[in-house]
Image (tube, grey):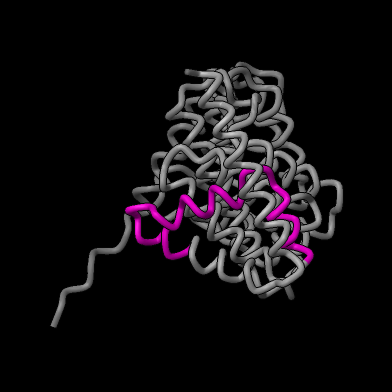
Amino acid sequence: MGVDPPPAPPFPIPVEQFVSELKPPASAATAAQACAAFATLATKAQVPETFRDAVPAVLELVSSDDFLDTKESALAALVAMLACVPGAAEDAVEHKVVDVVLNAAKQADGNRLDMNALEAFRILVTVDAAANAAIENDDAITNLINFVVDRCVGSTSVASNSTRDADGIAEASLDLLCGLAAKRSDGGACRDAVISRNGVTALGRALVAARNDEIAVRAIIGLAMTTGNEKERSELVHVPGACAALTRATRSPDGDVAGGAKVLLKALGQDEHLRPAIAAALRETMTSGAAADMDSA
């Protein structure tokens, strides 16, 4: 018989002490250190459920005018809470976590908060009650999806980052879009929210702009989940370069990319009304490509 692993050690900080270190008269530096310590400890010890009481204080710190380092540490602590503390996600939604985190991320220089913001949202949508509550707030879910859509295509909002940083943000954004589109416990409400807010176009543009297979496979998976009818497939076909990108993807050495692209192209080709548009899109792409080659010669 196997030996059970030893139980996780008790959490060394009571929630009351943690919260007190986040609020005045504690300094911004003290708050940042407390959040960083919590995020680290949460990976090593079981966090008591009582720590959901700290959600308001952490969100207040994320929304504060303190130094960016403090907000960054607070957001890392929030991610740890959402991942480890039962009920924290639901409490966070009640305290307008989507608005708070989006505002902080948008105001931060150099997109420093984007990765933690995207990870917080990714965890949030895995909790059905939290996801359902977010969907019911039309403004919040619209702002969230717009934020994600903007980053999954490598827009100018991430231009200040290195290519590696921009790719990481694109992959995390696509993971979140796929997570929303994949939810079924809500009767497809999250998927519908993505589609109705230009998700298909964004996924198509992400595929066209993909610089690596990790981005491409995520875009293809997302498209497979959001193009279930002719209207959605028509939207994809009319994304400039999408049909050509799919065709190129079928020749990818990555089996997941190639296999997914073939399935998607086959589905597109089965719509008779779309075949002329697909052919026209491919011809236009070939023509513009040839023109670009002549310009660079």
Residue that appears at 71% across and 33% down: 60
Residue 89 shows in this picture: yes
State the image quarter where residue 188 is shown.
Answer: bottom right
The front one of 151 and 84 is 151
x, y percent for residue 161:
51, 22
The quadrant in which residue 114 appears is: top right
Relative side of 81 to 196, left or right:
left
Q: Is residue 30 left or right of residue 130?
A: left
Asked if residue 190 shows in the view, the reply is no
Q: Residue 240: horizontal and vertical position, in percent?
A: 68, 43
Task: Tell me which segment is drawn in magenta.
Answer: 231-260
87 drawn magenta: no
Q: Quadrant of residue 106?
A: top right
For the N terminus, the quadrant is bottom left
- The residue depicted at 55 percent of the width and 38 percent of the height is 209
Residue at image location 70% in from the left, 42% down from the top: 56
Q: Residue furthest left?
A: 1
Examine the residues drawn in magenta and state their main secondary structure: helix
Q: 143 or 59, which lies in front?
A: 143
Percent x, y of residue 50: 57, 55
Q: Is residue 282 above or below residue 286?
A: below
Q: Position of residue 204 (x, y in %)?
A: 63, 49
